[in-house]
Amino acid sequence: MQYLEVKKARIEIIPMIDIMLFLLVFFIMVTIHMIPDKGLPAQMPGSSTAQELPKPKLVINLQVNGDAEVDGKTYSPSALEDYLRQHDPKNLQVTIAADKNADVDALVHVMDSCRKAGVTAIGLASRLESSR
């Protein structure tokens, strides 16, 4: 008489660890895109030719009263220039999010401060508006 050898079933852990790692990475990536950008609410001017730019490294909010705010702090043009010089201006991408009722003179002052600091990549934020 011949006896069959019965092997005990095992649960393989390695494939399960791989799947859990992929799920973890997936949820981290989704969560990163769900985090809103810092900024203050403003009524952006509309443009029918607006294009999406790469994510800026720095957003300057220009309010109706002419205040330039970065990360919740208000800066004068000269203080803004000093702030930008501290952040590697050659490789800095700046987007100016100006309220549509903001003074053009204040916008020019903010752009001048960026250029004096050495920033070469300056974008203006707008919302896409449907063509009329």
Image (cartoon, rainbow, N blue to C red):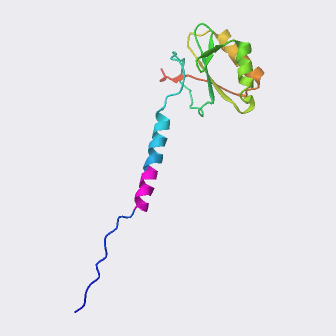
Residue in the foreground of this view, choosing between 47 and 108: 108
What is the tally of numbered marks visible in this picture? 0
**Residue lying furthest bottom:** 1
At horizontal 71% and vertical 28% (from top left) the residue drawn is: 87
At horizontal 31% and vertical 76% (from top left) the residue drawn is: 7
Q: Is residue 20 magenta?
A: yes
At horizontal 58% and vertical 23% (from top left) the residue drawn is: 125
At horizontal 49% and vertical 22% (from top left) the residue drawn is: 129
Indicate the position of residue 103 as horizontal and vertical percent values: 62, 9
Residue in the foreground of this view, choosing between 96 and 34: 34
Residue in the foreground of this view, choosing between 52 and 90: 90
Residue 87 to residue 63: above or below: below
Residue 86 in which image quadrant: top right
Indicate the position of residue 93 as horizontal and vertical percent values: 66, 30
The magenta segment = 13-22
Q: Is residue 25 left or right of residue 118?
A: left
**Residue lying furthest left:** 1
